[in-house]
Image: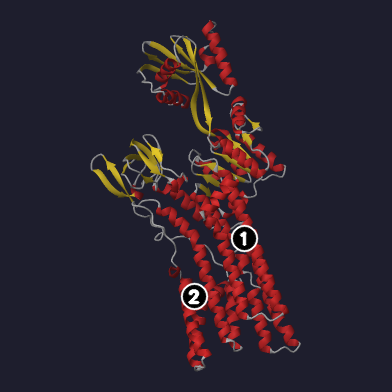
């Protein structure tokens, strides 16, 4: 029997109120399969004692007939529909076997087959509905309404879908955040374990990012909406999990292709099991009963169900932890990865330049040098200017007003700060033609910083060098652990592919534990590097975030994009997306994929052992029809439930620990 994983409808997936998400689980009787199975069971249990106590045939016969109809009409209809499409469905074979038993007087055995078959189908439907429940659970995290702050009307309660980017919402204590955004005002502890997995609430203040569905603590927050409701972290997880659930992995496609030929062969074998003993004088009733039992126990129901539950469960679990795997094909391929190539900026690093060094050249202290530079850079929108200004703010420096600001591309900025003309920019340009002692010292400091992988920025006051700043991108806190995990999983250390200069790349690579670094690469060079790895027989995983990474993501066996800072092109090209800046989830999802693949193999072994054992029993001895049905349907349920084990939180924890 083949049961597909159904997706939640729009009605079932309606978001919960802001008070908190209910724990929704599919009720047994909410499934039509369960209702029909219950009806068939009731009729069977009413008929059986009447038959055993010698009641008239019309009394118990009618009840058995109702059991046949209620338990068998749905799989029978599905089987006939498939037959019209020239596909032999196993469900139809089961119904035919039950009717065949009735024609030779085994009415009770046929009815029992129908009841067990219908009950098995209900259990499968209930088990596979757990994947849909996990998707609903994600949707339940998002509140239905939010409090929007309007300039004219003040506070207004609106449906979350009506919020637009740029709107300001008020999140009161104990409420769930209505949209992905950034805190404008207020401070609070926010429980975001449902999104990030962090066990403790996180302090959120002005400038911090918050996610829809996270639970606010004791403070009130004013939040500027930065994403539409349809593009929130939760919505993206749900959408991609649903899309992934509609795909089939290569293993599943292969099994379904084999299933059609197997079913035809099974029908031929069933006829042989019936006709050969009959030709040698076996009683018609016994030969037919043996053949029907053979048809039941040899059907590949458990084999068909072996693949998709583990893969879809893994997809849902990864989605809950911020890794959006786009298809079952991708989930299966992630487990095959045996080489990894990492981008640098925005992937291995945070992607945000930061001031790492302040080197004065005069009697002025570091704070004074940084103050002059930040004041001059304050009007600029250049990323390096933002890094200088942020560094001054972190030190609590009050910036004076800059006048006569001017910016020259490739050189730097110039402004009047406290009656001094301050210039901040490229040392080579600002020192051009200078030969005094301060300029010579500035050149030495510049060389030292650049040798260390920093970007050097010179600060001058009235034409005289006063200091040199070192600016660099910072390694992600989890980068080294991620590299170690990937090395352990694949057997070889990742390679670093970057367009940055060699010195900066080598420094970052050394900090992260990567020895093989390829720097100064254009997009086509990254593709060539990936193909070189693939030519050695490796299945390469590429992790990147920018537009320049998209070709390499497409060329790789599997591509993973960093979702928060990733470009739209990279997100579309990648096979999976890390929604948050958690690089450590990459080895975790690889480990989870390998566990899913192992469960697929385990399921196939379970199914094969049951089929082989029951068939051998039926051919060499007398296998009672009810026992054959119980063994066959029991194996199908075991396989389905075994695959759904990966929905549990413990499965992700074990995958993370292994990584």
Residue pushed farthest top?
436
**Pointer 1 residue:** 252
Q: Quadrant of the C terminus?
A: top right
Is 400 in front, or is 290?
Answer: 290
Q: Residues within 10 Å of mark 1 (few under 14, many from 20)?
A: many
Image position of 27 with respect to 21: above or below: below
Residue 233 visible here: no
Residue pushed farthest left?
153
**Pointer 2 residue:** 37
Q: Residue at x 46, y 26 (%)?
A: 387
Residue 89 image position (x, y, % from top left): 60, 72
Residue 522 image position (x, y, % from top left): 61, 32
Is 344 in front, or is 205?
Answer: 205
Image position of 249 with respect to 355: above or below: below
Image position of 405 with respect to 85: above or below: above
| Helix, strand or loop status at disc 2 | helix
Q: Earlier in the sequence, mark 2 or mark 1?
A: 2
Q: Quadrant of residue 78?
A: bottom right
Residue 50 image position (x, y, % from top left): 49, 89
């Amino acid at each position: 029997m083949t049961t597909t994983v159904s997706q939640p409808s729009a009605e079932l997936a309606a978001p919960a109120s802001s008070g908190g998400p209910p724990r929704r689980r599919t009720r047994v009787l909410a499934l039509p399969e369960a209702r029909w199975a219950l009806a068939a069971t009731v009729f069977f249990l009413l008929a059986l004692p009447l038959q055993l106590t010698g009641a008239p045939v019309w009394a118990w016969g009618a009840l058995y007939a109702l059991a046949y109809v209620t338990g068998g009409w749905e799989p029978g209809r599905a089987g006939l529909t498939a037959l019209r499409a020239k596909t032999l469905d196993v469900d139809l074979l089961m119904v035919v076997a039950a009717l065949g038993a009735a024609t030779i007087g085994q009415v009770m055995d046929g009815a029992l087959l129908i009841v067990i078959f219908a009950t098995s189908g209900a259990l499968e439907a209930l088990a596979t509905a757990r994947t849909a429940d996990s998707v609903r659970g994600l949707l339940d995290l998002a509140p239905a309404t939010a409090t929007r702050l309007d300039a004219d009307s003040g506070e207004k309660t609106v449906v979350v879908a009506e919020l637009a980017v740029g709107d300001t919402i008020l999140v009161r204590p104990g409420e769930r955040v209505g949209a992905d955004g950034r805190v404008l005002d207020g401070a609070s502890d926010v429980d975001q374990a449902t999104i990030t997995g962090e066990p403790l609430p996180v302090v959120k203040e002005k400038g911090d990012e918050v996610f829809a569905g996270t639970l606010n603590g004791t403070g009130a927050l004013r939040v500027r909406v930065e994403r539409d409701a349809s593009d929130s972290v939760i919505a993206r997880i749900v959408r991609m999990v649903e899309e992934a659930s509609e795909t089939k992995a290569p293993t599943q496609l292969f099994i379904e292709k084999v299933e059609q030929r197997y079913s035809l062969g099974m029908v031929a074998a069933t006829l042989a099991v019936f006709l050969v003993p009959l030709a040698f004088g076996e009683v018609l009733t016994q030969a037919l009963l043996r053949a029907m039992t053979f048809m039941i126990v040899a059907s590949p129901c458990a084999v068909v169900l072996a693949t998709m539950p583990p893969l879809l469960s893994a997809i849902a679990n990864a989605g809950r932890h911020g890794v959006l795997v786009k298809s079952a094909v991708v989930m299966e391929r992630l487990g095959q990865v045996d080489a990894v190539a990492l981008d640098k900026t925005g992937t291995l690093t945070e992607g945000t330049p930061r001031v790492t060094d302040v080197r004065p050249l005069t009697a002025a202290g570091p704070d004074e040098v940084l103050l002059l530079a930040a004041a001059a850079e304050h009007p600029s929108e250049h990323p390096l200017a933002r890094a200088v200004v942020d560094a001054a703010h972190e030190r609590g420096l009050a910036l004076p007003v800059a006048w006569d600001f001017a910016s020259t591309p490739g050189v730097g900025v110039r402004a009047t700060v406290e009656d001094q003309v301050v210039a901040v920019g490229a040392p080579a340009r600002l020192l051009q033609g200078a030969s005094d002692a301060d300029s010579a010292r500035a050149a030495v400091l510049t060389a030292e910083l650049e040798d260390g992988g920093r970007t050097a920025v010179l600060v001058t006051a009235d034409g005289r060098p006063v200091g040199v700043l070192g600016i660099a991108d910072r390694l992600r806190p989890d980068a080294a652990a991620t590299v170690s995990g990937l090395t352990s999983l694949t057997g070889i250390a990742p390679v670093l592919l970057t367009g940055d200069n060699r010195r900066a790349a080598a420094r970052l690579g050394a900090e992260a534990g990567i020895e093989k670094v390829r720097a100064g690469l254009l997009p086509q060079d990254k593709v060539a590097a990936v193909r070189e790895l693939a030519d050695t027989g490796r299945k390469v995983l590429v992790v990147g975030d920018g537009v320049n990474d998209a070709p390499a993501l497409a060329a790789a066996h599997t591509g993973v994009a960093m979702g928060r800072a990733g470009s739209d092109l990279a997100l579309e090209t990648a096979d999976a997306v890390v929604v948050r800046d958690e690089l450590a989830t990459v080895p975790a999802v690889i480990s989870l994929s390998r566990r899913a693949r192992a469960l697929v193999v385990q399921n196939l072994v379970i199914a094969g052992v049951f089929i082989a054992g029951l068939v051998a029993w039926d051919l060499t001895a007398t296998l009672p029809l009810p026992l054959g049905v119980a063994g066959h349907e029991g194996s199908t349920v075991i396989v389905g439930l075994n695959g759904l084990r990966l929905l549990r939180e413990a499965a992700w924890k074990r995958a993370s620990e292994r990584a």
